[in-house]
Image: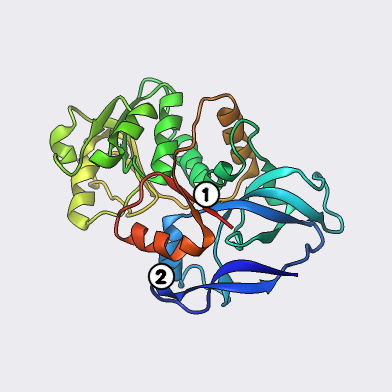
Amino acid sequence: MKMKTARIHEYGDASVIRYDDVQRPQPASGEVLIRVAATSFNPAEAALRGGLLRAFFPLELPYTLGWDVAGTVAEIGAGAEGFTVGDRVIGRLDSAGAAAEYVRAPVATLIAAPASIPLANAAALPVAGLTAWQAVFEHGQVAAGQRVLVNGAGGGVGGFVTQLAKYTGAEVIATAGARSAEAVRRQGADQVIDYTATPVVAALDGPVDTLLNLVPLSPPDATALAPLVRPGGRIVSIATPIEPPADAEVTAMHMVARNDVEHLAALVELIDAAVVTIDISESRPLADLGAIHRLSEAGRIRGKVIILP
């Protein structure tokens, strides 16, 4: 049986994304086959497609896109336990493949989907949510009473970071453009700085305990942000590394999120408890994935975009 996929056969701009008919996969031992309700777009996939990450993540081409998956279990492979046909599941697929009508996935990477939101919307959670969870709790060690600067709060990761930092009881100061400012306020930011109108350095009234950087920065901008963190504070970046002055007594790290189903399950609990919400800015068909890549590279995406097969 054939199915639709979005694949790349070579590195390049968004035009290399092809919509192919391929044979529907069969689950191997320890895997299930998922009928995909949605995947979601992550900006790092555009960098991967363009070849910018090939030194770290070499691809076997052709490569089916889609790290996030939300869907229903359609078939169960030998030895795969924990799910039955028809179960609603989500997960981060490190081998990708969710930009398709069906994808096979190891059961160890999957958990039950949130019960309180549409299944397709849950596809926005795994990659961005795990990144946010680990930035806030593991690396940032954000706690009640701290002042936290979220640089790049209007993006897909930023929405989760803002909510999780606020959930800890911290004071959250967020940078966002005018297009995202209202959404960031709804997500709990105590102060929103429009970085397009006012430099962050000028708008901030005193040092912060933690800087969570979620966006690429020029070297001068990265250098300017580092002194905003008080001695004993922390800098965590998922994008451009930020190095504080040698005598600053500030802990700085550049992080890459790992796949962790326990963290993902904790996020699902917060969603079902209405503590965390998912900001879906658009739902687009699989055939629009190339257009979404172009919009992202032009800086014209807010929140999370889900892709429907």
Residue 14: give its label: 2
The quadrant of the image that shows the N terminus is bottom right
From the viewer's perspective, tell me whether residue 117 is left or right of residue 160.
Answer: right
Residue at far right of view: 78
- 73 relative to 55 in the view: left or right: right
Q: Position of residue 104 (x, y in %)?
A: 71, 60
Q: Position of residue 21 (x, y in %)?
A: 63, 73
Position in image of residue 74 (x %, y %): 77, 53
Image point (68%, 60%), residue name: 102
Query: Is any part of residue 124 visible from this angle?
Result: yes
Q: Mark 1 points at which residue?
A: 127
Q: What residue type is labelled 2?
A: Ala
At 41% from the left edge and 70% from the top edge, which residue is drawn? 14
Q: Quadrant of residue 205?
A: top left
* Category of crowding for the residue at label 1, using alpha-carbon neighbours closer than 10 angstroms: few (below 14), some (14–19), many (at least 20): many
The amino acid type of the residue labelled 1 equals Val
Q: What element carries label 1?
A: helix
Label 1 vs label 2: CA separation?
21 Å
User: Tag 2, which secondary structure?
Assistant: helix
Query: Mark 1 against mark 2, which lies toward the viewer?
Result: 2
Q: Is residue 273 above or below residue 251?
A: above
The residue that appears at 61% across and 56% down in the rendered structure is 93
Q: Position of residue 253 (x, y in %)?
A: 38, 48
Local crowd size for mark 2, using a 10 Å CA cut-off: few (<14), some (14–19), many (≥20):
some
Sequence-first disc among 1 and 2: 2
